[in-house]
Image (cartoon, coloured by chain):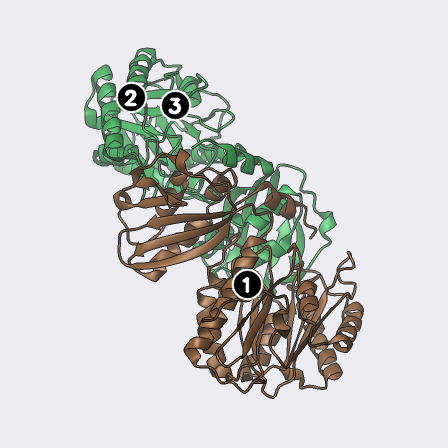
Chain colours: A brown, B green
Amino acid sequence: MTSIQPGRNGVTAASGFEASGVAAGLKSTGALDVALVRSLGPRFDAAGVFTSNRVFAPSVGWTRAAIADGQLSAVVLNSGGANACTGEGGRQDTARTAVVVAEQLDCMLTDVGVCSTGIIGVRLPMDKLEAGVVTAAAALAADGGPAAANAIITTDTHAKTAQATGQGGYAIGGMAKGAGMLAPGLATMLVIITTDAEVDATELDTALRAATHVTFDRADSDGCMSTNDTVLVLANGATGVHPEPGEFTEILTQVCANLARQLIADAEGAEHEVAIEVVNAATEDDALEVAREVARSNLFKCAIAGNDPNWGRVVSAVGTTQAAFEPEQLDVSFNGVMVCQSGAIGADRSLVDLRPREVHVTIDLHAGAEQATIWTNDLTHGYVSENADYPT
Amino acid sequence: MTSIQPGRNGVTAASGFEASGVAAGLKSTGALDVALVRSLGPRFDAAGVFTSNRVFAPSVGWTRAAIADGQLSAVVLNSGGANACTGEGGRQDTARTAVVVAEQLDCMLTDVGVCSTGIIGVRLPMDKLEAGVVTAAAALAADGGPAAANAIITTDTHAKTAQATGQGGYAIGGMAKGAGMLAPGLATMLVIITTDAEVDATELDTALRAATHVTFDRADSDGCMSTNDTVLVLANGATGVHPEPGEFTEILTQVCANLARQLIADAEGAEHEVAIEVVNAATEDDALEVAREVARSNLFKCAIAGNDPNWGRVVSAVGTTQAAFEPEQLDVSFNGVMVCQSGAIGADRSLVDLRPREVHVTIDLHAGAEQATIWTNDLTHGYVSENADYPT
């Protein structure tokens, strides 16, 4: 039995990794804004998944190329600027950042991953960033995971880390950031996961895609897909433990699920975390289509903010999908109370208590045996305030 | 030259139509809530388009069947309850409403259209509604258009009417309601249009589909498609004028465009009306896909509420589409200021003034010669308040 353990070590939970987080002045607040993660080996296997947005930042293009050979030895991350839509100059800034890391750590330039997050369409202050990378390299430490996790947050209210231990004693630990523009296509936000298990790059890629498919890919806070989403996993084999692939994938999935859940719990302005659970669908794709459509209904999301089990807004969203179902067979429950039964009026909605933060909306399509859950948030005054006032 | 004329006559702008609006007690406020529109002939040609939501109200099913033969002589409309997802009892309520109309007006049951709007999942108080229909029938008058337009509104802040005159002196007039759940698939909200031109049902259907395709279908306030959307047009030939089809379609389109624009201008909580204009697209479908994706970005909509020309939120939404474009060729202008040029930083965003209600966002895909515009709204505190607090 393995389970997620408490602890804030994140990317330094596994042995043979160092990390740091420093304040380079990219954030006007003076908060930590540059993070570095380094693998000490002996192996440097790595896998990654990236945003499927066709408008993607230079850091995504760079890291996708760097990881193509299945090897990474370090990842540099900055908050305070996404460096997206910044033209040829922005591409050169990303490359220059990797060059400084390679010089400082004496590693191959093509083994350095780069991640950026923050405002789109603004150039990074490279003098500050370069100096920050030098400082971060000097600060690398085996207990630097918490500082790194703090350095990558933007509108997040706190850092997110998770860790677990597998059979034979290997560890998987990770960190994540993301509070807005939170609707991954193939990946999400910035997530770095490390393990001291021995897992070659091909196995690592398979495990990562399996894990993200059912975790980050099913978090949809606000329907807006980022230009910078990146999930990386680095395996250094420091323990010499070669895990059974199914067990490794399961533990990796647990760590990813825990981080995804933390992201939804800290989404911009959110007052509720909402699981849209679609059951008895003809196919898993049908279940996902229905769940995502409901998760993206602003009327539904406002109703949750108002503690209102408004099932009419659920079924009207379901009705816009192509999924297999008959309208007169739809059942909808809020926190276990079936307020819509057979497509019509069910239990008294006053029986539903939506005051707790966590809400479960279950939609029974009566069309098969498949199911899927999307996690989303309510649409609140806080979300509007944060995104109407957030500076461009 | 024809143009939209001022005037509140709406569905009684054309000769040979009567209308009324009465308070039947469906709304707790005591406001008008039952409307009746009657054609005096000599012809009773009619056409309609309806919501493409698979979960649709009994009134939609009823009216779709009634209009199948291209004939309607009366339409009854109620606000204060959508009568959607109300099961077999709800279907019987719709039929019963039509029966009362047919009895009162001594017309064929199958020539009565029924429209309902309001809360989903609540049965209509049929005793009040039946009495209201009787009162409305007695109140029918050639100047009843304004009362009817007032009786169909829900969260709208005011009634919406439009009218125009065609060559030879025929009139087209109409009324519309809709303030939330405003994102039509094939139709929108409740819209009744009348004309005293002589246009047979087949021509009328062709003209209506052409008009709604470029008007109501391109209004997308909040991305939520209703269960009750209905647009009906009734032509009684009272003037004996048989218009040239192209001219009739053009004037009908003007009336529809005017009503659609009024709907967007009065959308729930809106502080801005925003035209998303996509130009130089490879196909019209590409232009529509891009415009709709941007119109549904909550981050973009919040930015507009904050008077912030945040083009990063535009291009990140464009990047999630399948439309033909190259990221490094995208231009984005806010009210004529090209803040994103060639996919990178353009003019100084401080040159953009977003304080006026009407905003034009132009996205140049540089991929062809097609274009399309979607009208949408910003996402405001008012929208959240109205939809978090709106009773189910």
Instruction: Name the kind of residue labelled 1 in the image.
Output: Leu
Whether labels 1 and 3 belong to a single chain: the reply is: no
Mark 3 or 2: in front is 2
Give me the chain letter of mark 2. B
Q: Which mark is residue A71?
A: none
Give me the chain letter of mark 3. B
Residue neighbourhood size for the residue with mark 2, other residues' Cα within 10 Å, grouped as few (<14), some (14–19), many (≥20): some
The residue lying toward the viewer, choosing from B244 and A1, is A1
Report the side of A140 relative to B277 (left or right): right
Report the side of B188 relative to B222 (left or right): left
Q: Which mark is residue B126?
A: 2
Whether labels 2 and 1 belong to a single chain: the reply is: no
Image quadrant where one finds the C terminus of chain B: top left
The image position of residue A261, as x and y in percent, is 52, 58
Compared with residue B303, is residue B22 higher up or lower down, i.e. above or below? above
The residue lying toward the viewer, choosing from A33 and A265, is A265
For label 1, the residue is: A259
For label 3, the residue is: B11
Residue neighbourhood size for the residue with mark 3, other residues' Cα within 10 Å, grouped as few (<14), some (14–19), many (≥20): many
Spatial CA span between label 3 and label 2: 26 Å
The image position of residue B211, as x and y in percent, is 40, 39
Compared with residue B348, is residue A113 higher up or lower down, i.e. above or below? below
Spatial CA span between label 2 and label 1: 52 Å
The residue lying toward the viewer, choosing from A385 and A261, is A261
Instruction: Name the kind of residue labelled 3 in the image.
Output: Val
Q: Secondary structure at mark 1?
A: helix
Residue A104 is drawn in which quadrant?
A: bottom right
